Image (cartoon, grey):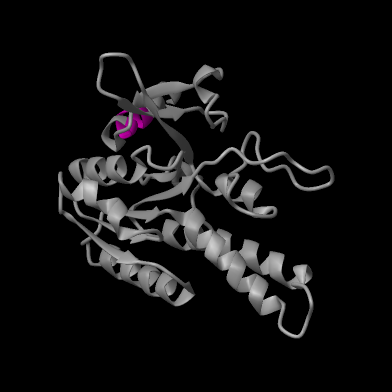
Amino acid sequence: MPQSASVLERDAYLRVLLMGAAKCGKSTSSIVSLEKTLGLGYVLCCGDKSGMLPATRQTKKFDFDIIRDEDDMEACLKAARDGVKEGKYKWILVDDFSLYASWLEGALRAASSVGRTEPDGRRMWPEYKQRILNYPRRLFDLKAHVIFVLHYITPSKEIDGQRPKSGEGIVPLLSGSAREEFPALFTDALFMEKEIEKGKTDRRVFRVNPEGVWGPGSRSADGTHTIDADFGAFLKLVKEQDVKKR
C-alpha cells in the first residue's frame, strides 16, 4: 500500500555496524552502555561466552544465547522478535558476527563439495551472500536498536583479479561481494579503538565518520568524530546531528 514520504525520516532506532580489533573491549563497552542508556537487551553471542564476563561485573541486566550454527541463529532471531514484540528487549546485539560468517562459509563450502573435488562456487557464493545480508534485514524489522559487532583485521596482501579485501565501505572478514554490500545495510558505522596515553588509563573510543571511512587510520580522515565508546554518547551525537540537518 502507498505510504507517506514522511515515514522516510531517520529511523528512531539505531542500525549500527561496530568494528574494531580483537580484545579492544567492543562487547563490554557495548553491553554496559546499551543497558545503561536503553534498558534490558538481548545478546546473540557467536563467540565464546567468556567474552561477556567483563560486562557482567558492571551489569547483569541482559539476556544472551550462544550461536554455533544456523539452527541456533534461527532460534535466536525468533527469540529476539518475540522479546521485542512483548516489550522486553530494547536492543539486540549480534556479537561477533564475523565468527558466524566464517562458520557459514565453511558449512556452505562443505555442502557444495558433495560429490565434487572442489566446492561449487556458483552455488555457494550467492547462497552465502543472501544469508549474510538476510540476518540484519530481518532484525531491522524489529522496533528495537540493532548493533552488529565484527572483528576488524587488516587483510593480507591482495591478489590481482580478486575483489578488494579492504578500503572504504568494506568489511575485511566477510567474503565475496558480501563484504561490500553488508555495511551498506546500516545507518551508521563505528570503529572502536583504545587510546593509550602515558600515565593515563586507556580510553576506549568510537570513531564516527559520515563518509563510511573506518579502520586504524580513520582518526585522521576528514569529518571523523571521536567520542567515548559509549552508546549513550553516540545517541547524543546522532540527535545533535539530526537537529543541525533540520
* Residue closer to the observer: 84 or 6: 84
Compared to 105, does 143 lie above or below?
above
Q: Classify residue 112 by image quadrant.
A: bottom right
Residue lying furthest front: 199
Instruction: Please give the name of the residue rendered at 71% of the width and 83% of the height, measured from the top-left corner.
Output: 114
- List x then y, in percent, for residue 175: 65, 54
- List x then y, in percent, for residue 53: 23, 52
Residue 152 shown left or right of residue 26 in the figure? right
Q: Classify residue 237 by image quadrant.
A: top left
Query: Count of labels shown?
Result: 0
- List x then y, in percent, for residue 102: 55, 60
Q: Is residue 91 visible?
A: no
- List x then y, in percent, for residue 82: 30, 70
Q: Indicate the quadrant containing the C terminus: top left, top right, bottom left or bottom right.
A: top left
Residue lying furthest top: 198
Residue 111 shown left or right of residue 152 in the figure? right
* Residue closer to the observer: 217 or 233: 217
* Residue closer to the observer: 98 or 93: 98
* Residue closer to the observer: 214 or 201: 201
Q: Is residue 178 visible?
A: yes
Instruction: Please give the name of the residue rendered at 36% of the width and 69% of the height, measured from the top-left corner.
Output: 76
From which residue to which does the magenta span run?
Answer: 234-240
Instruction: Please give the name of the residue rendered at 60% of the width and 44% of the height, measured from the top-left corner.
Output: 172
Q: Is residue 239 magenta?
A: yes
Compared to 204, does 110 lie above or below?
below
Residue 10 shown left or right of residue 214 in the figure? left
Compared to 239, does 138 lie above or below?
below
Residue lying furthest right: 161
Residue 224 shown left or right of residue 51 in the figure? right
